[in-house]
Amino acid sequence: MSFLLKLSFCILFLFHFVTILKANTTPPSSKWLEPYRVTITNHDVPVVVVGCDDRGAEIIRPGQSTSWKFRMNFFGTTSYNCRFYWLEQTGSYNVNKAVSFPVFDDEIVKLCGSSLANMNRCYWMIDRIAFYFSNTTDGSFPNDDAWRVMHVWSYG
Ligand SMILES: *[C@@H]1O[C@H](CO)[C@@H](O)[C@H](O)[C@H]1NC(C)=O
């Protein structure tokens, strides 16, 4: 959504806000920017540790996902940078490979969509080779063309 469109929504919102305050009812929370859900799934890496900004570190094993939802901020600058570690268990855990990149930013958002009314979905799939993106899980991984390679593992 363009900045001007957001601005007009904001003005419209403020107008309603003032009207509602006058009516002496509870003001609505700001729930009017595009909703997003980011889902990161581990396809076949034995152990992946992922840490995205302030979300804390999580372990995802093959077939497991981590997922969260949020709304785009007013300025359209919401982003999540994640660091991924591929762990190998050889007695103790060792970092085999690692990589870090934004799973959501002003570029990725273009791939997720920008619906105001419906959840916009950003799916990431991890396998032993790469990190893939899709805005749908209708097709099967990795055969469906919707999955595109965005990053590859590098050495830790
Ligand atoms: C989902 O991605 C495809 C390309 O892979 C694109 O054509 C389509 O417009 C996207 N959907 C949305 C809602 O952005």
Image (tube, rainbow, N blue to C red):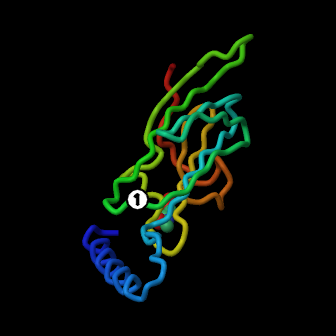
Q: Quick check: 53 above or below 49?
A: below
Does label 1 point to a residue whose CB lies under 8 Å from ligand 1? Answer: yes
In this view, 77 is above or below 12: above
View extreme (front): residue: 24
Residue 87's spot in the image, x, y percent? 64, 23
As displayed, is residue 24 above or below residue 143?
below
89 left or right, relative to 151: right
Give 48 or 148, whichever is nearer the viewer: 48
Q: Quadrant of residue 15?
A: bottom left
Q: Residue furthest top?
A: 91
Q: Is residue 96 left or right of residue 117?
A: right
Where residue 50 appears, as percent x and y from the top left, is: 57, 34
The residue that disc 1 covers is 110
Figure disc tally: 1
- Mark 1, secondary structure of its residue: helix
The one of 78 and 101 positioned closer to us in this rendering: 78
